[in-house]
Amino acid sequence: MRFSGVAAILSACALLAGCTSSRYGVEEVLAQPSLETTGSVAGYAVPPAEIGSGEEEQQLLALAPPPPTPDILEGPAKPHARHQVLRQRFRDAKPINFGRASPKSLAVHGVDVSRWQGEIDWAKLRSQGANFVYIKATDGGDHLDPMFRKNWRAAAEAGLKRGAYHFFYWCRTAGEQADWFIRNVPKVEGALPPVIDVEWNGESRCKKRPSRQKVLEKMQVFMDKLERHYGQRPIIYTAPDFYRDNLKGEFLDYPFWLRSVAAHPSKVYPGRKWVFWQYSGSGLSQGVDGRIDLNVFHGGEDDWHQWLARHAS
């Protein structure tokens, strides 16, 4: 629904340079260009803001009821229609020789995408062995990837298992970001668990790097809120430097999706269990113009079906 005062509100926003869609609820603000990019896929940026004292996060942690804590790989299996697994036929613009630890030895491959992949021929991408996809949905507290809704529908129609990810912005509160993700990502049957993408980003307008304690606190608030809403424990996506600074030895009861494009995760993240491995940022596939991130599930085809039965909503 359009409102007669939209033009006036937008003008005021331009003058004040501090208006966001989460504050006024104006959909047009979502179309503003962004300077934000992720480490693996570029995206939209959230206007800069100061990192708060953390009082909101502390209050939420103290008052919110604890979420369920199912084992990340176990738990009761739900009725599950067996998902056809196709052999991957991707190429790589910058191939890496992983030796015996090659991701090609694993059965279930997939991709992650955002607006930067443009228009995707999902049927062709699926035919190349994309069995699952994680789709960029949101970052910060007021930016939505402009291709998310289209990609979300089209991926399901092409037969891919789909999930959504949120790029975490360190200059916004965790509660705001969780609310924004929940507002934009549907709770649907068969969806993969939501993902929180946490990394240091040198191209971000937000230059703050919170302390390790603050990082863990904000992540916990965000993940608790998503778990209560979707009934699924979120997956943590991260990169080597951020993991080293903040996550080594932490969140042992959470599933991880690890970026490691030059060596096997066991060498880059020793001792860390993982569910997904992003092994390339330079993949090539029919159905996509340009490069695409390539990922693989940690297990065989039967393991994949069992994991879906327990964790896909």
Image: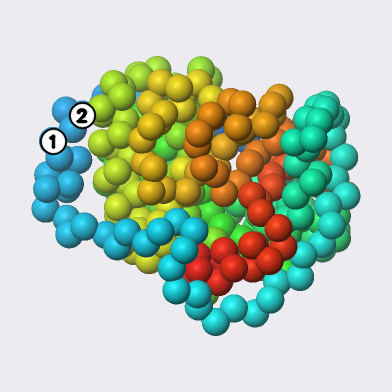
Q: In this view, does 87 lie above or below 191?
A: above
Q: How is the image coloured?
A: rainbow
Q: Which of 263 and 171 is in front in this view?
A: 263
Label 1 amino acid?
Answer: Glu
- Label 1 packing within 10 angstroms: few (<14), some (14-19), many (20+): few
Residue in the image at 43% along x and 68% along y: 75
The residue to which callout 2 is attached is 52
Q: Is residue 61 above or below residue 208?
A: below
- Residue 19, x across and y down, in percent: 32, 37
> In what element is the residue under mark 2?
loop
The residue to which callout 1 is attached is 55
Residue in the image at 64% along x and 49% along y: 298
Q: Nearer the viewer, residue 77 or 184?
A: 77
Q: In which quarter of the image is the N terminus?
A: bottom left
Q: Which mark is residue 159?
A: none
Residue in the image at 38% along x and 66% along y: 231
| Circle 2/circle 1 CB separation < 8 Å | yes
Label 2 amino acid?
Answer: Gly
Residue in the image at 75% along x and 49% along y: 106
Corner quadrant of residue 93: top right
- Residue 224, x across and y down, in percent: 30, 52
Q: Is residue 289 visible?
A: no
Residue 160 located left or right of residue 290: left
- Residue 48, x across and y down, in percent: 36, 26
Residue 83 located left or right of residue 243: right
